[in-house]
Amino acid sequence: MISNDFRDFNNILIVKPSSMGDVVRCVPILHGLRGRYPQSRISWLIHPQFADLLKAVGELDEIVEFDRKRYGKIIRNPNATREFIDFVQRLRQKRFDLVVDLQGLFRSGFLSFCTGARVRLGFSRAREMASVFYTHRIKIPAVCEHVVESYWRFGEVLDFPKSSMQWHLPIDPAAGQRAREQLARQGVESPGKYFVMLAGGSKPAKRWSPEKFALLAEQLYKCYDMTTILLGAGACEKALAEEIARTVRTAGLEIVDLVDRTDIQEMMAIIAGARLAVGNDSGPLHIAAALTVPVVGLYGPTDPVVVGPYGQMDGVVLAGFSDRRRHRYSRRSEHQMDNITVKQVLETVEKKMKLSEIRQAKEPRATDSHAL
């Protein structure tokens, strides 16, 4: 039976500023809140870099942008200090009555407290002592569980029905049109007739080598006669993509490099139209999983039991042993990404392709109407 504390809320704030993958994995909480409190106003505090992820989500009333780097200068910059104080005051003036802190750090806990909301939910084991700012604390088991399941424990406390867990991640129509035009310029006309390759990752240790990605792209073309499109953002990922493309072209094949040439919504639209997405543990990989695109995820130091592509664990290719790990992040040599072979990845791609063909024969994959 739900506590009286959680029966009615009129103005709700989700605090999850970053990262891209984590924001995506928290989308079911937004949908659960909208279903549980249909008349409430719901806002999301997020870093400007990731705000476009939520641009077309109809269940959301407001996006509150919080630039951590900008306000991180408050100790040594008087202007930044004044701007941060102004931001906190504006946040408090919004009069939220429920805050759901899914970030679990000192900064997010402090901002939750600054809202003055009568109910502030957060993890009991939040890092950096963030739990001191919450009125109610959510317990998670000591054993490893997927982060999506951990986030959903907020829904259990708020009495969400299990059936409300969903990833409705719509794509802005204008972005979908721009993506179609971008692909047309590259000679890619048809949705479902190309692969997406995601060679980036937040840490070097999470990235498969460009040489192996290039060899994989060659084999994918030979096996399936489909174009491979490289997606991502940032100087590091751009350099990786250029190396992959250069190696593939040396072999006489073509690959489409769109790294740093799309915004987030355009990237989502291109991913949504892909036949399959293959890549490292990264934000775009989790976007692909959320869009129900067949996914092959390459995992080394990070534990897929905790951060794998939710709902598509059959697409995980794991470096080293498959036994359960003691820690979420492993530095053991057997879990280094270089231990993953191109053959392993191709075998998993083949398995996922066959499964998706069977599913499409029964019921075509549902993608957003504005996807490619």
Image (cartoon, grey):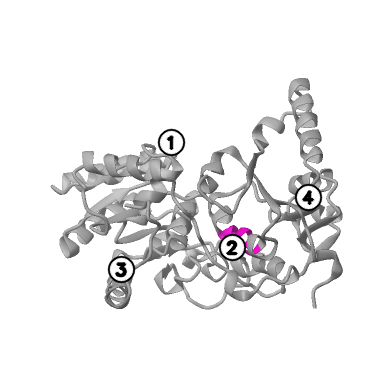
Q: Amino acid at mark 4?
A: Gly
- Helix, strand or loop status at disc 3: helix
Which of the two discs, 2 and 4, sits closer to the camera? 2
Which of the two discs, 1 and 4, sits closer to the camera? 4
Which residue is under mark 2? 28
Which of the two discs, 4 and 3, sits closer to the camera? 4
Upstream in sequence: badge 2 or badge 4? 2
Residue nearest the observer in this picture, 38 or 330: 38
Q: Amino acid at mark 2?
A: Pro
Q: Specify whether 122 is left or right of 296.
A: right
Pointers 4 and 3 in contact (C-beta within 8 Å): no
Which residue is under mark 3? 349
Which residue is under mark 4? 109
Tag shown at residue 112: none
Q: CA distance from mark 4 to mark 3?
A: 41 Å
Q: CA distance from mark 2 to mark 1?
A: 31 Å
Q: Specify whether 270 is left or right of 105.
A: left
Write the residue at 80% across / 66% down: 7
